[in-house]
Image (spheres, rainbow, N blue to C red):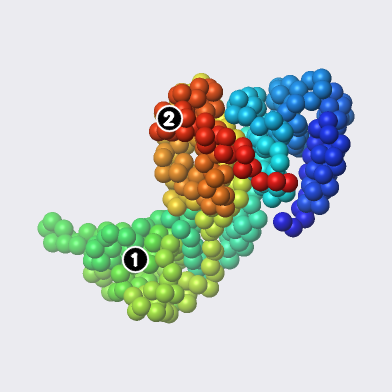
Amino acid sequence: MPPRDTRECLLVVDDSIDTRELLQRNLSAQGYEVLTAADASEALRILGMRHVDLVITDFKMPGASGLDLVRHIRENLKTTEVMMITGFPSVEGAVKAIKSGAGEYLSKPFTKEELFAAVSRVMERLSLRKASQASSERPIANPLGMLGESDAMQAVFKAVARAASSITPVLITGENGTGKELLARAIHYGSSRARAPFVSINCTGSPEELFERQLFGYISGGPNGKTEAHLGFLQLVDGGTLYLEEVSELPYAMQTGLLHVLEEREFQVLGSTDSHAASFRLIAASDRDLRALVNEGVFRDDLYIRLSMNVLAVPALRERGNDVLLLARHFLNELSKGVTKSVPRLSDHAMEVVKSYAWPGNIGELQNIISQLLHSTESDIIDVPDFPPHMRFSVAEVSILNRSLATVEAEHIRNVIAAAGGNKTRAAEILGINRKTLREKLKQSESTAPGS
């Protein structure tokens, strides 16, 4: 593991000077600032003087125990995490530590790799909690009305501002649900055309003849031999912005007609020989690769060249880091209005689920999930079991891929026992084994723990 870029502060609390020195040496080599204390009282003195990100405490110590220290931290220090270590491993001890608020529980002896992995997991949860708290305390909105703090979205915001000051066509690319139309509107309303119409057309589904009539308008015969003019989108958008959603689905013949309008800056109403000036700014969007469609012969190369003069690529939600937490908090605040008396919050583990899930449906899927949670959860805290199964299982699969089978099994057994309130008989029933097998597995997991 390479040295860390930031200096997060850790406090090691253990009555063994050898253990303190070993942990301090190993964790300092990882880039952490490491303080030490010989007992709980000394730890409390340090915690009263400065901020500590993570406290790693022994279970049994002279005077106040590690559990007492954990409880104090949980009750008084909201931005400090806790990890418990012990030379006297037991299921009961793990249950007590977890219930008291310890984020991780390690039994001595443990390897450096196990220590580093446990610390990394705790620090990641702390980072997620801080990000969530920051978003709820000061939600950051771009001047264009969009949310996003990530570097990827900051780059998008700058691209939107540049596009708003230009008159060339814009092609917005990105997966379904990433907010392409919102960005198109931001470009329009940030431009000199803001007072003119913004006309949005979905290119999917309409028959070619109907789409042509809708786009160009048409003249039809009326009663008593009189003709009637039906305005098309190109007339309605005069002076404004025409937004073509899913431009990849535009029929080939219509691609030719659109290209002519862009080149000649004029069009004819169907059924008329009169030309009309085409005064609009074109923004197109697609979640498909237009270059690949050109190679397949289903999208005009010359139209693609015109559209690709100014390409704005929108990142998927999974590529936006902690923005997903910012958006989750935003949707919790907005969607809970009129539904609940207070705004629920996400537990630490729930934030891990939100952060780790791939979000194939992007922002739209996140909004739908938050809406479902608000209507199905009565508690003020949204936790992992409240999420749909496909989300829980997908995150669990990722988190165990780099861990041994024995480690995963032992952790699962401890979690089941903790969930059963320490009742081993009930835990054995849930696990589908008898009490004797449960005792053997617990004994095996303790006796085969790797050395330091």
Residue 422 % position (x, y): 54, 23
Q: Which mark is nearer the camera, 1 or 2?
A: 2
**Residue found at the very far left of the displayed protein:** 224
Sequence-first tag of 1 and 2: 1
Q: Is residue 404 visible?
A: yes
Residue 355 % position (x, y): 56, 45
Relative to 270, say whether 23 is above or below: above
**Mark 2 residue type:** Asn
Classify mark 1: helix, strand or loop: helix
Do labels 1 and 2 touch, CB within 8 Å? no
Relative to 139, say whether 244 is above or below: below
**The quadrant where residue 199 appears:** bottom left
Classify mark 2: helix, strand or loop: loop
Relative to 110, say whether 155 is above or below: below
- Label of residue 172 in the image: none
**The quadrant where residue 109 appears:** top right
- What residue is rendered at 66% in x and 46% in y? 450
- What residue is rendered at 50% in x and 44% in y? 396
Residue 366 located left or right of residue 166: left
| Viewer-side residue, 450 vs 181 | 450
Considering the image in quadrants, where does the N terminus appear? bottom right
Provide the residue designation for mark 2: 434
Provide the residue designation for mark 1: 249
What crowding class fits label 1: few (fewer than 14 Cα within 10 Å), some (14-19), or many (20 or more)? some
Residue 311 % position (x, y): 53, 67
